[in-house]
Amino acid sequence: MNENLKIKASIITIGDELLIGQTIDTNSAWIASSLNNIGITIQRRVAVGDEWDAIWKALEEEGSKSNIVLITGGLGPTSDDITKPLLCEYFGGKLVKNQDALNNVIEIFTKKLNRPLIERNLKQAEVPDNCIVIQNKRGTAPGMWFEKNGIIFVSMPGVPHEMKGMMEDYVIPALLKKFSIAPIQHRTLLTAGIGESFLAEKLIQFETSLPEHIKLAYLPNYGMVRLRLTDLKSNSQSILIDEHFELLKSTIQDYLVVDQDLSLQEVVAIKLMESGKTISIAESCTGGYISHLITQMAGSSQYFLGGVVSYSNEMKHDALNVPSEILKEFGAVSTQTVEMMAKGIRLLSKSDFGLATSGIMGPGGGTDTKPVGFVCVGFSSEHKTISTSFQFRFDRRRNIELTAINALDFLRKNLG
Amino acid sequence: MNENLKIKASIITIGDELLIGQTIDTNSAWIASSLNNIGITIQRRVAVGDEWDAIWKALEEEGSKSNIVLITGGLGPTSDDITKPLLCEYFGGKLVKNQDALNNVIEIFTKKLNRPLIERNLKQAEVPDNCIVIQNKRGTAPGMWFEKNGIIFVSMPGVPHEMKGMMEDYVIPALLKKFSIAPIQHRTLLTAGIGESFLAEKLIQFETSLPEHIKLAYLPNYGMVRLRLTDLKSNSQSILIDEHFELLKSTIQDYLVVDQDLSLQEVVAIKLMESGKTISIAESCTGGYISHLITQMAGSSQYFLGGVVSYSNEMKHDALNVPSEILKEFGAVSTQTVEMMAKGIRLLSKSDFGLATSGIMGPGGGTDTKPVGFVCVGFSSEHKTISTSFQFRFDRRRNIELTAINALDFLRKNLG
């Protein structure tokens, strides 16, 4: 077994907003993924409110179970924040002004925000005198690194981009150094068009054949399933995991999208960039979501020229040139209409490829022949204009997500 | 004190995918919000992997701290799921076939999915004989309600829409009945244009004046701060909380968006529906995200006619009629261009109002005069076409989100 596996970590997230459901905790997943990549196993994640006893108890409990306890939240400027004085007392220190943190707060307020400094902002520069201070390059609250009985406790702000900056710049490198960690081996692939249980059925024999130190994980998300092989032994074994990964690929080859840890939109982006081709998108039922998925990626302007969100029939006709007769005869949700939409957006934007969606996302709008969840997707290139249709059975939000993913997969297949 | 406050709940989320960061846990926030609405306080949320000892220990620990333990995840069809046999053993029962659950599985596979039933799907209809079975109307895995030493444990699938169905149809009503719960009073308002610390500074006196049983919470999200007053006493006190809420409103009136628990896009939707007006959106830097935020809401086709994602200059010119001279002289990111875009989309879609965004989201593309995070937003109606600009300082994803929220707020202010 890899020595790393003896290193166990816990994440403690602090904040009343997590317990009343106001905030979705994205920090824990990000931290878990970062630590997992360097071979540190998260064994527990705990969220507690801004309450002295609850935080204290969580520190005790997680400190007794793990070697590393990463804490986020509870460091903001408002009065309900008690984390810092608590940490100070828990580790037996006293609060002192930290000059670097103070300079940082002053710089952010006077230079960047151009706002007056108030007392509660200045207090953010106070830190316990028995921790290593982690400077915050993206905000005003400094991070803190404590050690007690050989256990490491790191406290960071709850603002995601501030926490990520500290993790990347300081915490991850410091942990790698501290524990002399050998990275765990992962091999990941993405499948589409098959559910988790059917995939598992096809992989019974493959799973049985795996040595004990290689694990297979099913990671379903939005109608696609990611499969991940993890080799828990040290990295001298990479040939072995590669052999098993090849076997895995050939076993599920009919459903394989890509044999790397990429999202579908990343696969599409790579294909377009490599071929030097461009895309544009006409969205009805997805309402801009596919364009958003693409433009969220840096550099997307290289291959994405734009789109039309043709929610009304007039927009389909006026902006995309879908003939009124087509709309009248076959309806806005039809293979005929999405083909014209895909062609229309391609010609309007002068792109190489056009993609189009139209469907009934719910909760209203369904009919007997076109129930809620019925979706048409069109693709157009210089050489062909084609379409397909799907029937989903979920709520509006999930129907939009599934339509987007399946449309992108239809695009991917037709990019050649 | 309200009797409800003695009822404490914990959430346990089960699944390796949570500990390797593959999945963001949205279930916990949704459950916390649902329970909070009926006055049950979540005191801890814990996530553990698909590991026998870890789950067992979490049941013991949370069961010793809370009256209600809600468990999600670990009930899927793949082989790594051990939750059901564990629960069976923990509560001292044995697995038996449940006819209703079996009928449900058969119906889903044969009628809805039109796929063959395999052994591991049939096994989903097995349940411990010492629980109340909660039928799953949206999937194959049934839920389970156990009681042990007066503590309630409810196990539900991790698929969000399946879990939500069970909570709404069965768990929430059953908890209300079991504990004769009197709902907690909440009053919520939404502010924009002011940071959490400055808001807190303005509210020092207000906070000091609150009686002990009324609490103020700051809930910041994407450049907006939601303020929530909670009355922990029984609901006979609603006049008192209303008085404090009025005082809160007048104290922060310059930043008040709406005095209800609504999102900005909901506020915009209500204004448009009430006035019978329509909107269309031209997005450059936000790449379809604003259209997505609007079309995610059911019924948005009543007031949203469509949009253009004009990522390329050609799209700005060809689809939105932005004059080439404007693009050349002032650039794509300029108040002049967004004003023409807002007007262009309004005329193209024949809507009452047009909204437009153009900016530099990063990481690349910034210049000395227009650095990363510089954004212009335009608004156009029959009577006026105006614009504003912002400077954000975050990463691409957050810049997109902040641009969307600030553009929607600019729209709201100009809807009158």
Image (cartoon, coloured by chain):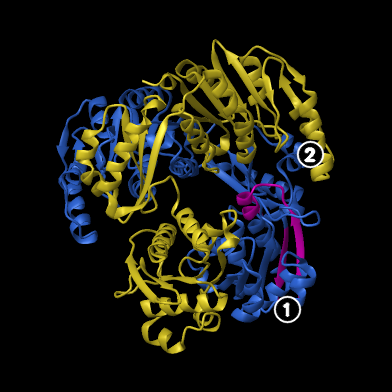
Chain colours: A yellow, B blue
| Real-space Cα separation, disc 1 to disc 2, in angstroms | 39 Å
Q: Position of residue B10 (x, y in %)?
A: 43, 32
Labels 1 and 2 in the same subunit: no
Q: On the image, which quarter does residue B275 sit in? A: bottom right
Q: Are marks 1 and 2 in contact (CB under 8 Å)?
A: no
Residue hosting label 2: A108
The structure residue drawn at horizontal position 65% and vertical position 26%, both measured from the top left corner, is A82
Amino acid type of disc 1? Pro
Would residue A321 be visible to someone looking at this image? Answer: yes
> Relative to residue A327, is residue B317 drawn left or right?
right
Q: Position of residue A374 (x, y in %)?
A: 35, 69
Q: On the image, which quarter does residue B327 sit in? A: bottom right
Task: Quarter of the image for the N terminus of chain A: give it.
Answer: top left
Q: Position of residue B164 (x, y in %)?
A: 38, 48
Amino acid type of disc 2? Ile
Task: Give SS at disc 1.
Answer: loop
Q: Nearer the viewer, residue A326 or B175?
A: A326
Residue hosting label 1: B323
**Which residue range is magenta in the image?**
B375-402
- Chain of the residue under label 1: B
Residue A334 is covered by the magenta coloring: no
Task: Quarter of the image for the C terminus of chain A: give it.
Answer: bottom left
The structure residue drawn at horizontal position 70% and vertical position 52%, both measured from the top left corner, is B192
Q: Position of residue A252 (x, y in %)?
A: 27, 49
